[in-house]
Image (cartoon, rainbow, N blue to C red):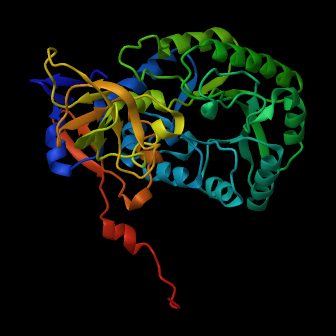
């Protein structure tokens, strides 16, 4: 996170003091560094140099229009998993031939929307989905490019809720059934088989599962070509992990990842697609919150802050860890205390950290949650009638609100009372 540093004891995003943003927009809020997003994307591009490839950013990580525009301007494609994400990609100016439609439960309306609007390919998850795409394509008189997602039965060795490549997971076609499914797909009208899709999970910090899965996909590519299928594109998914703890530097780099891909698929003459999401934006963002007040409990102390689980769900959902740091740098000589850092929502799960060592914090002081650029704002809700928090983009010495905080009245006014009440 090179663009998040203390300057004169004040945390800055690039050249903007976090405290200045807080004074302008209030807390809590998300803030992203444009330079970090651009650098992370370019690192992936450089890692794949010398190959035919397209980086399709996984929009589910962070789908703000400004983020999409930054990446689109750099030549990125988009990996979408809903009709809404498809329309967001189009609104951001992403060409149709750079949009890949993934997702395990595409509806007929979503399939029709993408066919009519243009699509690079559908990554198909099941035979019923193949049939539905065939029906819609035939009705529209077109032929649709598809890859079929293969479940390689490889344990990604990541959190159980974000592992997608084992046989018991809901995703894809079992690899043992792949040749049969491809033969079935080839018999359908409106379907043009172009390749294979695979994605084994998220937040992988070991390349071994990738090696195992990709080796199986190479072998399957060769088998399907023998069967007569024109396999020329391989979508290898995403999932490369990031460091959520500043002390942990044992994370594979895009260069490590790219070298593995080149070694396994060398000589196969396929276009390669990668779908990084978290790696592009995760460490390019912070969530900023204010201390409401410290509280002394029985045998422990609490910091009650104005951000809550509805703003950043990951700790409650995955027991996820985030580094948390004061926005005003404290002297190294200050004695640290142990705090449970919690939000104001009426749930015990509204807890961000247990017994975290922190300086003594007073009401009104600012805290920064690192590595909050992915799966933060996109997973937020209005639980407890709490408004969605703003998103802010920084470029150099400038900042702009790229999603405003709605008012409570905006939330209430969306309700409609039946006339019998």
If the image is split into quadrants, where does the N terminus sit?
A: top left
Q: Nearer the viewer, residue 363 or 310?
A: 363
Q: Is residue 176 above or below residue 82?
A: above
Q: Nearer the viewer, residue 288 or 351?
A: 351
Is 394 left or right of 58, judged from the image as shown?
left
Looking at the rendered structure, the number of numbered marks drawn on it comes to: 0
Is 20 left or right of 144, judged from the image as shown?
left
Which residue appears at 55% of the width and 31% of the height?
A: 275
Is 62 left or right of 325, judged from the image as shown?
right
| Residue with the most extreme left position | 8
Residue 82 visible: yes
| Residue with the most extreme bottom position | 420
Q: Position of residue 115 (x, y in %)?
A: 65, 53
Q: Position of residue 208 (x, y in %)?
A: 64, 12
Which residue appears at 17% of the width and 37% of the height?
A: 362
Q: Position of residue 22 (x, y in %)?
A: 18, 44
Residue 38 visible: no
Which residue appears at 66% of the width and 41% of the height?
A: 121
Q: Position of residue 414 (x, y in %)?
A: 42, 72
Q: Is residue 166 above or below residue 249?
A: below
| Residue with the most extreme front position | 298
């Amino acid at each position: 996170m090179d663009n998040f540093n203390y300057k004169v004891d004040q945390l800055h995003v690039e050249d903007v003091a976090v405290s200045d943003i807080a004074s302008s927009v209030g807390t809590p809020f998300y803030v992203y560094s444009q330079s970090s997003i651009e650098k992370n994307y370019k690192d992936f591009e450089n890692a794949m140099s010398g190959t035919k490839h397209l980086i399709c950013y996984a929009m589910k990580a962070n789908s703000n229009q400004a983020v999409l525009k930054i990446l689109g301007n750099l030549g990125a494609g988009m990996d979408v998993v809903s009709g809404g994400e498809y329309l967001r990609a189009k609104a951001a100016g992403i060409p149709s031939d750079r949009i890949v439609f993934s997702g395990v439960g595409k509806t007929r309306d979503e399939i029709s929307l993408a066919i009519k609007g243009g699509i690079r390919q559908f990554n198909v998850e099941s035979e019923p989905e193949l049939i539905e795409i065939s029906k819609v394509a035939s009705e529209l008189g077109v032929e649709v490019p598809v890859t079929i997602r293969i479940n390689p039965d490889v344990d990604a060795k990541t959190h159980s809720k974000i592992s997608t490549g084992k046989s018991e997971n809901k995703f894809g076609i079992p690899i043992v059934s792949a040749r049969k499914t491809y033969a079935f797909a080839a018999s359908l009208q409106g379907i043009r088989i172009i390749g294979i899709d695979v994605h084994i999970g998220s937040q992988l910090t070991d390349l071994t599962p990738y090696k195992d899965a990709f080796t199986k996909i190479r072998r399957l590519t060769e088998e399907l070509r023998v069967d007569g299928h024109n396999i020329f594109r391989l979508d290898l998914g995403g999932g490369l992990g990031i460091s959520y703890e500043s002390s942990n530097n044992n994370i594979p780099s895009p260069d490590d990842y790219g070298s593995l891909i080149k070694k396994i698929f060398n000589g196969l003459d396929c276009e390669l697609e990668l779908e990084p999401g978290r790696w592009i934006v995760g460490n390019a963002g912070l969530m900023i919150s204010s201390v409401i007040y410290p509280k002394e409990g029985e045998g422990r102390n609490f910091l009650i802050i104005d951000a809550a689980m509805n703003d950043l769900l990951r700790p409650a959902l995955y027991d996820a860890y985030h580094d948390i740091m004061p926005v005003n740098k404290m002297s190294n000589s200050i004695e640290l205390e142990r705090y449970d850092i919690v939000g104001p929502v009426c749930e015990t799960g509204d807890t961000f950290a247990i017994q975290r060592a922190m300086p003594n914090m007073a009401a009104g002081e600012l805290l920064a949650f690192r590595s909050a650029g992915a799966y933060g704002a996109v997973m937020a809700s209005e639980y407890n009638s709490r408004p969605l928090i703003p998103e802010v983009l920084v470029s150099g010495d400038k900042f702009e609100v790229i999603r405003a905080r709605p008012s409570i009245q905006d939330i209430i006014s969306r309700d409609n009372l039946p006339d019998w009440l």
